[in-house]
């Protein structure tokens, strides 16, 4: 009985601590638990995959990265952004390692995403670097 009380006490303390840091626990239909911010407004996640042309050199890639960082830092409507490259995970039939860069941008609203799309810095970035890519794929996701 003492072990059970200890477990219940520890679980209560964990829930209280999570709540104090602004998280609530929600159980999904698949019975997995996740933490969700208290702000229930759904965010938009804009995922961009860049497939560069053959022959793009290290200097051009560095300029591309710097240009992307400068552009993203210029748009105040962006809530959060990250730049990545294909991970060195094991090849599997469902994994696409063929892209060169990934850009993940989060917005608090579709309206902010629309401002980003029309932002002059976005147009400058495309104009300056479009010659480096052969393909771009975009996946826009509403975070649940």
Image: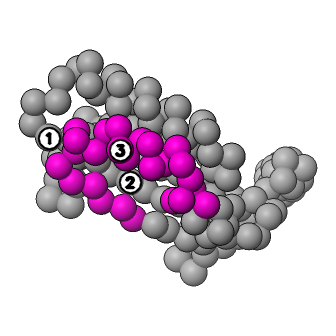
The kind of secondary structure the magenta stretch mainly shows is helix
- Disc 1 to disc 3, how far (Cα)? 16 Å
Q: Looking at the image, is mark 1 or mark 3 nearer the viewer?
A: 3
Residue situated in front as seen by the camera: 118 or 24 = 118
Instruction: Report helix, strand or loop for mark 3.
Output: helix
Residue situated in front as seen by the camera: 92 or 31 = 92
- Disc 2 to disc 3, how far (Cα)? 16 Å
Q: Which residue is mark 3?
A: 127
Say if residue 9 shows up in the picture: no
Q: Which residue is mark 2?
A: 48
In-image side of 56 versus 112 (left or right):
left
Residue 38 colored magenta? Answer: no
N-terminal-most mark, 1 or 3: 1
Say if residue 72 shows up in the picture: yes
Q: Which residue is mark 1?
A: 53
Q: Quadrant of residue 27?
A: bottom right
Q: Is residue 1 above or below residue 28?
A: above
Q: Looking at the image, is mark 1 or mark 2 nearer the viewer?
A: 1
In percent of width and height, residue 134 lies at 17, 49
Q: How is the protein colored in the picture?
A: one colour
N-terminal-most mark, 1 or 2: 2
Image quarter (top left, top right, bottom left or bottom right) of the C terminus: bottom right
What's the magenta region? 115-139
Residue 138 colored magenta? Answer: yes
In-image side of 108 versus 51 (left or right):
right
Residue situated in front as seen by the camera: 36 or 77 = 77
In percent of width and height, residue 17 lies at 86, 47
In percent of width and height, residue 20 lies at 90, 49
Dots 2, 3 in contact, CB < 8 A? no
- Disc 1 to disc 2, how far (Cα)? 16 Å
């Amino acid at each position: 009985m003492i072990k059970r009380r200890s477990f219940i006490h520890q679980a209560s303390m964990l829930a209280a601590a999570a709540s104090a840091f602004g998280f609530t626990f929600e159980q999904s239909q698949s019975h997995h638990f996740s933490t969700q911010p208290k702000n229930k407004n759904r965010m938009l996640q804009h995922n961009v995959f860049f497939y560069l042309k053959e022959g793009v050199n290290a200097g051009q890639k560095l300029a591309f990265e710097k240009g992307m960082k400068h552009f993203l830092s210029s748009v105040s409507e962006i809530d959060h952004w990250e730049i990545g490259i294909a991970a060195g995970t094991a090849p599997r039939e469902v994994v696409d390692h063929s892209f060169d860069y990934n850009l993940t941008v989060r917005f608090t609203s579709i309206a902010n995403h629309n401002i980003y799309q029309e932002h002059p810095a976005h147009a400058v970035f495309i104009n300056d670097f479009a010659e480096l890519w052969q393909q771009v794929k975009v996946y826009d996701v509403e975070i649940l």
